[in-house]
């Protein structure tokens, strides 16, 4: 073991101190010894007991030195919460029949490193690993120093590792400008880590336009709801090594109109009392005699509006009312299907003569589906009640039942298709 220098690595993760001993021989790195030690003296990714940590490290370095018969002067520390990015690149050199020299390998390494420095200006190269040596289109097991040929290439290994929970991952965003470069792309999901998607959004999406195979090594959980855990929209292959869980299922979510900014007609229920007819409507959806409003989504704000509002035989004109409070949302704007609360937004919008415009909007989960009710009346003594009562009632007059059949759900939500994978995905 004296012929080639040994390198000692220490990886500090959430559960272990992992020591690696590697042999760096002629640019070929080979791991020759590994030792896992349960972590002590750390809390919340910080050293809580320095003496304990120092004692453990010194003790195990001594044991490793005894084992491999080598005294280390340096140690390479790998911290899990760095969240490093790895990329694969290929370098080459035309030989024109000449012999491969060590200088040729150094040239390729330096050339590739300069490219990484250019495209990843805010990052630092920690280490470069050699892999896949090719001489004249033939795969060579080790660095072919001393051999003759016309064309030599070797691949550089880089990847993205998730060591904490993440959502809505787009591979084009992860790899940036490298997305359309023809080299293998690798994503690793660590154990006890979940990569998920908000309702209707893929957990990991490989969009069209990709160049190069994507390899996903899953040691944790990848899951989608109303979308796919892994959605391959490219013409390339996604190869999965699954040591954990990859799953997806259909889910309730906003329909195509309201998954982004959009508007639609929503009919009112109610209209049970008042001096005149209960007419309130938006002119985009008909004229006199209609009973509806226009629901508009802009960002995460939901507003109802109307252009005609009859009170005591008089059109009091148009108006609007913010009802965002009845829509439980995630920060991304997707429907929060884990929220089982019920919501009501009710107001007396205006008065005229003997009448007043009451508006009430409610949402409640029934049999796993969120239902929505839009109600209006032209008397103030009208109340929407959910819970076990489920009515829109005018005191001493008429009560309307709130049931799924008069809910506006079908105009707002839809059942979104989901699954473990879509497109060309192998290994599941």
Image (spheres, helix red, strand yellow):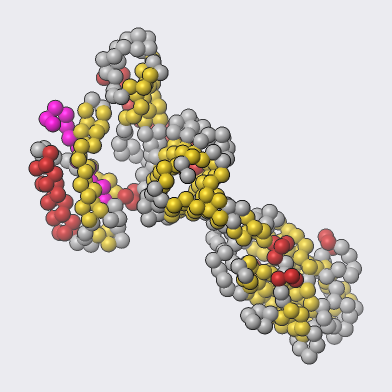
Instruction: Work out whether residue 164 can be spotted.
Output: no
Residue under the point 48% across and 29% down: 182
Please tell me whether residue 328 is drawn above or below residue 108 in the rendered image: below
Residue projecting furthest to the front: 428
Q: Is residue 6 magenta?
A: yes
Q: Compared to 63, does 307 lie above or below?
A: below
Above or below residue 27? Residue 94 is: above
Q: Which quadrant would the N terminus be assigned to in this image? A: top left
Query: From this viewpoint, is residue 9 visible?
Result: yes
Q: Residue 423: where, in percent of width, then height?
A: 56, 41
In x, y percent, where is residue 350? 77, 78
Q: What residue is drawn where x is 50% and y is 52%?
A: 247
Which residue is drawn at the image coordinates 26% and 15% (left, top)?
146
Choose between 64 and 9: the one closer to the eye.
Answer: 64
Q: Pick out the residue farthest to the top.
A: 97
Rendered view: 261 above or below 290: above
Residue 303 place in picture, x, y as percent:
70, 65
Q: How many marks?
A: 0
Residue found at x 23% / y 25%: 26
Report whether 10 appears left or right of 321: left
Horizontal and vertical percent position of residue 176: 49, 39
Which residues lie in the magenta part? Answer: 1-12
Is residue 45 toward the left or the right of residue 427 in the image?
left
Task: Answer whether residue 22 is magenta in the image.
Answer: no
Quadrant of residue 138 in the image? Answer: top left
């Amino acid at each position: 073991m004296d012929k080639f220098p040994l390198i000692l690595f220490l990886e500090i993760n959430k559960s272990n101190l992992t020591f690696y001993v590697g042999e760096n021989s002629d640019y070929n790195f080979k791991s020759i010894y590994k030792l896992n030690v349960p972590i002590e003296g750390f809390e919340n990714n910080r050293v809580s007991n320095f003496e304990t940590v120092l004692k453990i490290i010194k003790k195990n370095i001594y044991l490793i030195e005894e084992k491999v018969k080598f005294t280390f002067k340096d140690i390479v520390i790998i911290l899990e919460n760095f969240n490093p990015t790895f990329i694969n690149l290929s370098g080459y050199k035309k030989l024109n029949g000449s012999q491969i020299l060590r200088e040729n390998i150094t040239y390729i390494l330096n050339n590739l490193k300069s490219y990484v420095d250019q495209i990843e200006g805010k990052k630092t190269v920690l280490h470069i690993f050699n892999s896949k040596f090719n001489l004249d289109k033939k795969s060579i097991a080790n660095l072919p120093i001393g051999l003759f040929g016309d064309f030599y290439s070797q691949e550089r290994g880089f990847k993205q590792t998730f060591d904490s929970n993440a959502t809505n991952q787009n591979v084009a965003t992860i790899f940036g400008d490298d997305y359309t470069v023809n080299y293998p792309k690798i994503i690793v999901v660590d154990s006890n880590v979940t990569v998920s998607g908000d309702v209707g959004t893929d957990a990991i999406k490989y969009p069209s336009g990709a160049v190069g195979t994507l390899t996903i090594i899953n040691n944790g959980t990848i899951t989608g709801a109303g979308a796919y855990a892994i959605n391959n929209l490219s013409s390339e292959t996604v190869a999965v090594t699954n040591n954990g869980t990859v799953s997806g299922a259909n889910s309730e979510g906003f329909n195509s109109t309201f998954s982004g900014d959009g508007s639609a007609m929503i009919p009112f229920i109610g209209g049970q009392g008042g001096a005149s007819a209960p007419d309130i409507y938006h002119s985009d959806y008909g004229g006199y005699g209609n009973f509806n409003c226009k629901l508009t989504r802009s960002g995460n704000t939901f507003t109802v509006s109307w252009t005609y509002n009859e009170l005591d035989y008089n059109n009091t004109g148009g108006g609007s009312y913010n009802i965002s409070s009845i829509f439980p949302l995630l920060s991304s704007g997707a429907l929060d299907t884990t929220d089982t609360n019920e919501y009501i937004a009710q107001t007396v919008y205006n008065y005229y003569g003997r009448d007043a415009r009451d508006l009430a909007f409610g949402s409640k989960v029934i049999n796993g589906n969120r239902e929505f009710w839009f109600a209006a009346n032209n008397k103030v003594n009208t109340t929407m009640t959910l819970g076990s009562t489920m009515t829109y009632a005018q005191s001493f007059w008429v009560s309307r039942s709130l049931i799924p059949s008069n809910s506006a759900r079908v105009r707002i939500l839809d059942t979104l298709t989901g699954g473990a994978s879509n497109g060309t995905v192998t290994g599941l």
